[in-house]
Image: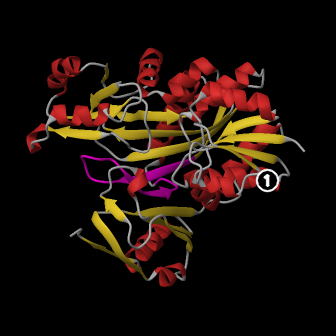
């Protein structure tokens, strides 16, 4: 029996583990969390950090996997590239290029060199440097860690509304693994994510997804809808920018997830990732809207089988996340009624009654989600929104 090592075993990585097992592979799951949901599905579990390149390499030498991949996490992309190079396995992205796909500072610098449309930015490593630079960005700008994900540490500074720039800098700095922060211009316009698959350097854009995010100062994703309702002209521009972006990063093979803002100057790249999209976009929404299962495609690529990117149909799909406020969850009602609604395909809760919650500052703070499908994006979104209104979540203040 051939073995596959999958870096990451959280809820979002479970579909990849399940698909590998369906194919008869022996799955070795790696995650720092001993209680990771995927550990209950995998054949062997190793509780080490997925960003520990040497630790994962040592585990690979001991377990001798035939294949090693990651699923929906950013930083393990670097680890996979490192271990594959050390073991002389085929590369989807080189170890050197993997830094551009996992570190926003390296990414932005590469984009600037290659002429990719991006916002103005600066890489900041010292507080004094920040104090000198931020006045040149006007009254509104973004601060974010160079090396984090899931909206952790991202803040909008709005001086007109009394935001303290230094406080926001310290907030982002504290959520950076390396103490590196980006300051960038605040881009106005709709936001989309783009799911693509690259084979031998040629990229196929599979889905463009409209996004809903929380109001500033945080930017937590609360919903996604496919396919995008933007004009065909804008979507053509998006596809062109994404293909140039992935070429600039150095993606050779595999899935990718790119986020863009549609500004008055055209689409500009927020960031890209050389892995499957999270938030159930690639595992749930893309299959519902196109019939293409990118998780299946990723496993096929890893094991050297044919990757089928044929679109089976053109439908709509949507996901909405249940946000939080501050307090304790006292009740969650009407879930069964919402599940019975036409078009609803899944409702999942991440938290339970009695859990203490502290607002929606990152993706990890959301209470749960609703997924729906329809004949088109508008119908899928309407069904999702109706189900969300049906669900009742009672949150009480802490005494």
Query: Which residue is rendered at x = 14% and y = 24% of the image?
Result: 135
Q: Is residue 92 above or below residue 285?
A: above
User: Left or right: where does residue 156 sit relative to residue 82?
Assistant: left
Residue at the far top in the pictured view: 113
**For numbered disc 1, what is the local secondary structure?**
helix
Between 274 and 13, the residue placed more toward the observer is: 13
Residue at mark 1: 21
Residue 30: quadrant of the picture: top right
**Residue 144 in picture, x, y percent from top left:** 33, 34
Q: Which residues are magenta?
A: 207-228
Residue 154, by quadrant, is: top left
Residue 364 at x, y percent in the picture: 43, 53
**Is 340 left, or right, of 54 in this rendering?**
left
Number of disc labels: 1
User: x and y percent of residue 352 in the render?
Assistant: 44, 70
Residue projecting furthest to the right: 1
Q: Compared with residue 287, is residue 64 higher up or lower down, i.e. above or below?
A: above
Which residue lies at the image location 38% right of the left edge and 31% below the top edge? 176
* Residue 252 seen in the figure: no
Quick check: is 220 in the magenta stretch? yes
Can residue 150 be spotted in the picture?
Answer: yes
Classify mark 1: residues with Cα within 10 Å, few (<14), some (14-19) or many (20+): some
**Quadrant (top left/top right/bottom left/bottom right) for the N terminus:** top right
């Amino acid at each position: 029996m051939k073995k596959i090592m999958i870096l990451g075993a959280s809820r979002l990585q479970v579909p990849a583990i399940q698909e590998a097992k369906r194919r008869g592979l022996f799955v070795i799951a790696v995650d720092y969390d001993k209680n990771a949901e995927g550990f209950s599905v995998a054949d062997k579990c190793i509780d080490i950090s997925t960003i520990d390149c040497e630790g994962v390499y040592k585990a690979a030498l001991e377990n001798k996997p035939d294949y090693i991949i990651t699923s929906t996490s950013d930083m393990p992309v670097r680890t996979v590239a490192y271990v594959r190079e050390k073991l002389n396995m085929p590369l989807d992205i080189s170890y050197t290029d993997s830094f551009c796909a996992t570190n926003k500072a390296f990414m932005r610098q590469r984009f600037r060199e290659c002429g990719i449309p991006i916002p103005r930015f600066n890489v900041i490593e010292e507080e004094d440097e920040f104090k000198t630079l931020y006045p040149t960005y006007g009254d509104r700008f973004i601060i974010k860690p160079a090396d984090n994900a899931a909206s952790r540490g991202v803040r909008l500074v709005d001086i007109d509304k009394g935001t303290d720039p230094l406080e926001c800098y310290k907030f982002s700095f504290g959520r950076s693994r390396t103490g590196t922060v980006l300051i960038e211009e605040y881009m106005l316009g709709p936001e989309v994510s783009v799911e693509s698959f690259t084979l031998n350097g040629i990229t196929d854009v599979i889905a463009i997804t409209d996004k809903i995010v929380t109001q500033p100062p945080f930017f937590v994703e609360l919903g996604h809808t496919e396919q995008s309702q933007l004009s065909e002209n804008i979507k053509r521009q998006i596809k062109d920018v994404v293909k140039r972006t992935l070429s600039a990063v150095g993606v050779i093979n595999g899935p990718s997830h790119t986020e863009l803002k549609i500004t008055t100057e055209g689409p500009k790249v927020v960031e890209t990732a050389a892995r499957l999209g999270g938030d159930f976009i690639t595992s749930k929404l893309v299959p519902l809207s196109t019939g293409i299962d990118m998780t299946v495609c990723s496993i096929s690529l890893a094991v050297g089988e044919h990757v089928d990117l044929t679109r089976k149909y053109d439908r709509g799909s949507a996901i909405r996340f249940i946000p939080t406020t501050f307090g304790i969850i006292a009740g969650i009602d009407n879930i069964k009624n919402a599940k019975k609604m036409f078009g609803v395909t899944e409702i999942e809760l991440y938290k339970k009654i009695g859990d203490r919650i502290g607002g929606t500052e990152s993706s990890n703070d959301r209470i749960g989600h609703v997924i729906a499908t329809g004949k088109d994006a508008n119908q899928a979104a309407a069904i999702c929104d109706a189900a969300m209104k049906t669900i009742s979540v009672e949150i009480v203040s802490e005494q």
